[in-house]
Image: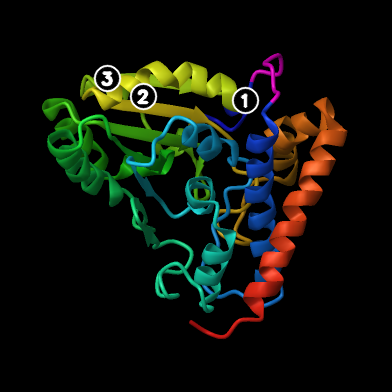
Amino acid sequence: MSAVAALPDEAAVLDPSDDDLLLMLTIRAFELKLLELFGRGMLNGTTHTCLGQEYIPVAMEGLLRPGDHVFSNHRGHGHYLARHRDPEGLLAEIMGRAGAVCGGVGGSQHIRRERYVSTGVQGESLPVACGVALHLKRAEPGALACVYIGDGTFGEGAVYEALNLASLWGLPLLVVVENNGIAQSTPTSAHLAGSIAGRAAAFDVPYRHTDSVDVDEIRTLLAPAVEAVREGAPLVAEFATQRLGPHSKGDDTRPAEEVAGLREAGWYARCAARFPERLRRLEEQARARVDAVAADVTARGLS
């Protein structure tokens, strides 16, 4: 799927609640702050932002329960913030400062908190999530394991082993595919034969696709299927989305005009056009909070 094919339907209604929009803007402000801090030499290592994809974890969080497990990937800051609303702990972890979620040893990609785990290893979380889903089926009926992966992860064998077991055993496994049209610097059309829908069908796993950026529309579409997951019907939910930032920091090989086109069609630009004053008010609130968090965390000692 190309980046152009991932553009959302312009006619779709886009009117998130203030709570949802504020969370999306907070994630966006956090990611922009990371890039700023990195540019100032205050961050080390990798920094994979989810700019453009913030609405996905916000939409999914509205379908998840506290007892569900969430497995994230290398581009997981938005997943964590949607789940735990904890920019302080996450920034401290990334910077290795006091108050870090994992004592500063996990950094940007490897975080564990309660029923949330992230990993930078492609495909690693899927078989683990299968094991957790099997446990939930036996010990906590109604709970599910939600795992986020990208289109590039479909080059890993663990994806197919996990889908096979989930289908055979009727596991409560929810696979959320954030297909942003590019795997690091390789377009999806150059690394994925067939389709993600076809891969799910090969294992008789139900599949849903959306190119919407409206969190309420997404929840309406996925809610029945997610409830079926809780009863043991695994699901692959594919989001046709846009990665507006580089893979990690400055390694973006796409033409500037392509990225600009994606940005103009993204949720942020569309909200700015639809309700500019509300967006401005909530964005100021989000930025102020993230600025305060950054000032606090950078003044702390090492973890």
Where residue 216 sits: x, y (%)? Answer: 58, 23
Q: CA distance from mark 1 to mark 2?
A: 17 Å
Is 265 on the left-hand or right-hand side of 198?
A: right
Secondary structure, magenta segment, majority class: loop
Which residue in the structure is indicated by mark 2? 226
Is 159 on the left-hand or right-hand side of 27?
A: left
- Residue at x 81% of width, y 25% of height: 274
- Residue at x 42% of width, y 38% of height: 151
Can you tell which of label 2 and label 3 is closer to the viewer? 2
Q: Is residue 40 above or below residue 215?
A: below
Does residue 163 appear anywhere in the picture?
yes
Specify which label sits upstream in the sequence, 1 or 2.
1
Where residue 34 sits: x, y (%)? Answer: 64, 63
Q: Decide: marks 1, 2 in contact (CB < 8 A)?
A: no
Q: Quadrant of residue 268?
A: top right
Does residue 194 appear anywhere in the picture?
no
- Residue at x 52% of width, y 45% of height: 82
Specify which label sits upstream in the sequence, 2 or 3.
3
Check disc 1 and give the amino acid type.
Asp
- Residue at x 22% of width, y 19% of height: 204
Residue 14 located within the stretch drawn in magenta: yes
Q: Which residues are magenta?
A: 9-15
Q: Which mark is residue 201?
A: 3
Estimate how packed mark 3 is, as few (under 14), some (14 to 19) or many (20 or more) residues with alpha carbons within 10 Å.
few
Q: CA distance from mark 2 to mark 3?
A: 17 Å
Residue farthest toward the top in the current orientation of the protein: 11
Q: Is residue 205 above or below residue 27?
A: above
Badge 1 marks a residue whose secondary structure is: loop
Residue 172 located within the stretch drawn in magenta: no
Q: Is residue 205 above or below residue 180?
A: above
Which residue in the structure is indicated by mark 1? 214
